[in-house]
Amino acid sequence: MSGEIGQIALCLALALALVEAAAGLFGAQPEGGAMRGIASGAAMGVFVFVALAFGALEWAFVTSDFSVLDVANNSHTMKPLLYKITGVWGNHEGSMLLWVLVLAIYSAAIAFAQRGSARLTSAALGVQGLLTVAFVLFILLTSNPFLRIDPPPFEGAGLNPLLQDPGLAFHPPMLYTGYVGLSASFAYAAAALITGKADAGWARAARPFMLVAWIALTLGITLGSWWAYYDLGWGGFWFWDPVENASLMPWLAGTALLHSALATERTGAFRVWTLLLAIAGFSLSLIGTFLVRSGVLSSVHAFASDPTRGVYILIMLGLAIGGALALFAWRAPQLEGGASFEPVSRESALLINNVFLTAAAATVFLGTLYPLILDALTGTKISVGPPYFALTFAPLFVGLLLLLPFGPRLGWRRGDAREALRILTPAMIAAAVAFVAVLAFASPRTLTGALSFGLAGWVIGASVVDAVQRRKLRAFSAGALAVVLAHAGLGVTLTGVAGVSLWRTEVLEVLGPGETVAVGPYTLRFDGVVAAQGPNYQAARGDIGVLRGGREVAQLHPEQRLYPAEGQQVANTAIRTTGFSDLYVALGDDRGSGRWTIRAYFNPFAPFIWFGGAIMALGGLASLSGRLRRTAPLPAADAISVTP
Amino acid sequence: MIRFGTLCAVLLLSLQTAFAAPPPERLADPALEARAVSLQKELRCLVCQGQSLDESGAPLAADLRRLIRQHIAAGESDEQVKRYLVARYGDFILMKPPLERDTLFLWFGPALVLLFGAGVATIVIYRASKRPEARPR
């Protein structure tokens, strides 16, 4: 039954999305007043029906209704309830439905919030409606999760054990909230171009959605990285895998957009560029969806590939990006000249930030797509791995971080570089101390490490200076806190990345009962392996005593799990963290007579990678709370008019 | 269903716990072993997704790790081992793509984008600083 309910709900959502698109676009015209209410109502309706379809699929998974093909292919009665619920988006069809659900939530939120002028909101809903039509059609035509199978099998095929992890509950929904959330900025930007009023109004209206998307994307990437770290068993946190890159590109563009829109709102500067970035940000989300969902890449994320899906997404991609760019090319030249500011000013700093972030996004884009394009054009197969990004992406970020502390210290329109340098002196001292400390105490002593920590000290120190300065001036608003946290978070993440990359210790040994091996400051004692039984797996469970200074400080239990339903074996790592470093242990294969391979890492500063991500997201939240509390628009800098 | 079965098999092959060089494969000389480890970090597991030989648990990766050690033990330099593997498997095996005519844009693209961006930014800043300050409200 739930399959039919879902199918019907999805069809009704499609019909209402068509209404939303048409009414929204008509409502964008000066004389389209009557249509605007219809567009808002339709957006709410689309949300209700997509949510109903999603609920129906949830129901089919939770009740193990194997007459639904998607459930039969991806679920199993023995699977714990959590993974039945989250397993809905652990496959292609269900994850596309989640995509559309998030899109519908944003549309409903735009309709509900009615930020910006009535025409702007209406046009934005029209664009959201078009996107919804395209994606619901995609689901119904190529990826229908409600297809039946006759006769239904007695048992489902199960879910990839790597995905049977609490991470599945948080990472994909969070990432999609970010990915798809960029559609709101895209829709508002397109709406501004459609209504022909591309002043700062659209950016102000879109700001909360931009922030929500950015926060979610930051958290989603952070969670994904953490999940890969503890789940995949070799202690890496970022692999420059095309699928990861697909999420990093929209993040870089979104970060650039947040900064550029700041200037557009305050002084009217970079209006054309901000519009273009909003279009580019969501376009990169779409390209990411194409890369992950079309099957051109095979990875853990590409559940199954089907060429028709790729072709469909490619057409959709072309229409959305091409349409938006055409609109841009048609309307943007009509925008009047920009703002006036000195070479040394906040505006210039934001512009330079954007140059670096755009170049970084372009680098990830090149590294991800170049092998595909080269293969298609010449048949030459190359790999673009971490060494490429270390040589190209890393220097760009170093440049960005070197200049970052100056941004918040420069005034709008006219800044004082000398004064900024003077105020930032404590940050320079912090950088020097970090640099020297690494050279003095770290082992092995590396210049890269000293420079990385110096850079992190510079960025974090500058955030502290910024906070202190603003407190002194009694100007410590939510927005100021946002800047302090977001920038400091980046420095914290850098510390973690540098720490793990440069000072990780790795051991790989075959141990018998009672034998020990040293890793970092710890000694591991192998106490043997016992059999353990999970809800839907059998495990070989290692007992490992962790000694530090001759005293036992912990017991770790890494496992090798066999999932009979899926016929797969996966490792479950054990991590002991102090908040400053991780001891990471994985159990390998049975070498006979009680001996097992043990792989262990000592990862100094590893937790900082994710702490930093969380701090950045907190910064975003601070900014969002400031935005939602303030109803009046920001005062324009120096009382300069921003209306063109 | 068949497709799902194949997928499972592929995942089973590629996603088992990764073990770089369990002790029996290891070279006795620590200096040579260190070279082998750093080499296998620069080379790609040919049958998995984006993993290096160092991280992969696939049987082919284990064979290649052994092969690398045989060549190193035979006294070859890192470059010679790489050349040998590239001759057999193509550039695909290198995690760091070589600088060739085909990859010029890949390698210099980021710098070009940065230079282009810097150029545009300079013009924008120059024009903004020349624009009259007060504009009619």
Image: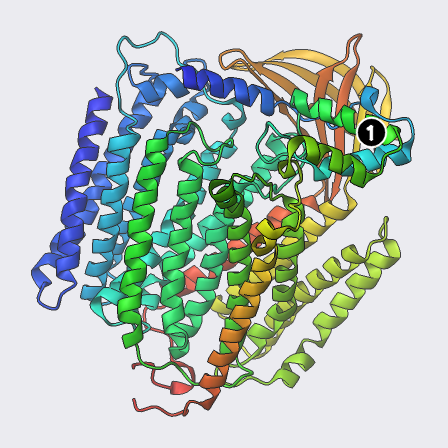
Q: How has the structure been colored for display?
A: rainbow
Q: Nearer the viewer, residue A151 or A166?
A: A151
From the top left corner, tell me how far across and down residue A287 is, in percent. Answer: 41, 47
Secondary structure of the residue carrying numbered label 1: helix
Q: Position of residue B38 (x, y in %)?
A: 78, 38
Quadrant occupied by the N terminus of chain A: top left
Q: Find disc 1 in the rendering and name its residue.
A: B71
Q: Nearer the viewer, residue A266 or B98?
A: B98
Q: Residue furthest right?
A: B29
Is A54 left, or right, of A599 in this rendering?
A: left
Task: Specify few, some or many for label 1: CA neighbours under 10 Å numbering under 14, 14-19, or 20 or more.
Answer: some
Residue at the image point whose x is 86% and y is 49% from the top: A443
Q: Is residue A566 visible?
A: yes
Number of numbered discs visible in the structure rendering: 1
Residue A396, image x and y in percent? 61, 61
Residue located 83% across and 15% down the image = A512
- The vertical placement of A599 against A15, above or below, is above
